[in-house]
Image (spheres, grey):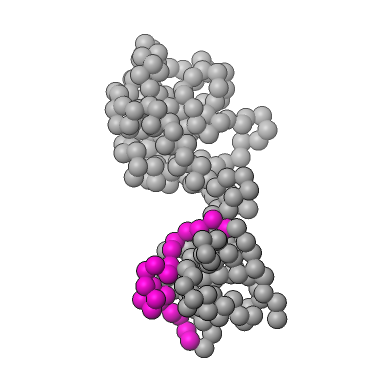
Amino acid sequence: MPSRQLTVGEAVQTLSKDLNLTWVAGHEARSRMLTRDLGPEERPRLLGPLNFNSPNRIQLLGAAEVRLFGESSVLDASRFEYSVPNTCDMIVISDSLPAPASIVDLAEREHIALLQSDSNYSHLHNRMRFLLTQLLAEREIIHGVMMDVHGTGVLITGDASVGKSELALELISRGHILVADDAPEFTRIAPGTLECQCPPLLQDFLEVRGLGVLNIALMYGDAHTRSRKILRCIVHLQP
């Protein structure tokens, strides 16, 4: 399953909806790839507090870090035991704390996104980790029909014209629920756990040969469709 390729700008746009992020400096970092491969020599963690020893792609600053770095008027990248320009893509300050001048200068010089959030440090750290895990999770589209059958996520697969949609329609007519037709997207949300999500353009629709594209929500009611479901079973149809 391939992981999603994500730029700093895309990550900020998504995270801002939940964490109210505002840009402070380093706007040039928008196009940096947050998911780029740095090779075996440099493998920074995804998220952690800003420090001189351990690299993180996204560095967080709370009150303690703001006091520490606020003592220096100029912060040279050589003070860090790792390559700041290569490993650090984003710095986020919690609690609406003012950005130390040394951090602003570092962000501008090294083209690192510097942002501020009104969330407290603990909430910011936990929420960002959760949201980034979802954003960067491995995902893949598998041809088939995803159904919720008696509360169990069932993926119906098979060759073209084998009867996947016809079987799905029969299940729906018996009270079961459509999740996604044709191109369900699966995301590895945890080890051994795949979640299916219906692409927005396909939501509520089922294409059946001879009948065309059916709006299941209009025909059977909203209770017969849903947007996501954990995969528990695969049924492969054969001619």
Q: Is residue 84 above or below residue 72?
A: below
Q: What is the x, y in percent for residue 89? A: 48, 34
Tell me if 226 is positioned left or right of 236 in this view.
left
Q: What is the x, y in percent for residue 49? A: 46, 24
Does residue 188 belong to the magenta stretch?
Answer: no
Residue at 39%, 42% in the rendered image: 15
Q: 140 or 203, which is in the foreground? A: 203
The number of callouts visible is 0
Residue at 42%, 70% in the rendered image: 224
Q: 116 or 220, which is in the foreground? A: 220
Q: Is residue 236 above or below residue 151?
A: below
Farthest right residue in view? 239
Q: What is the x, y in percent for residue 183? A: 54, 67
For the C terminus, the quadrant is: bottom right
Q: Which residues are magenta?
A: 211-231
Farthest bottom residue in view? 210
Q: Is residue 204 above or below residue 69?
A: below
Does residue 222 belong to the magenta stretch?
Answer: yes
Residue at 35%, 19% in the rendered image: 63
Q: Is residue 32 above or below residue 200?
A: above
Tell me if 138 is positioned left or right of 174 in this view.
right
Residue at 53%, 79% in the rendered image: 170
Say if residue 223 shows up in the picture: yes
Q: Quarter of the image holding residue 71? A: top left
Q: What is the x, y in percent for residue 140? A: 58, 57
Farthest top residue in view? 71
Q: 32 or 139, which is in the foreground? A: 139
Say if residue 110 shows up in the picture: no
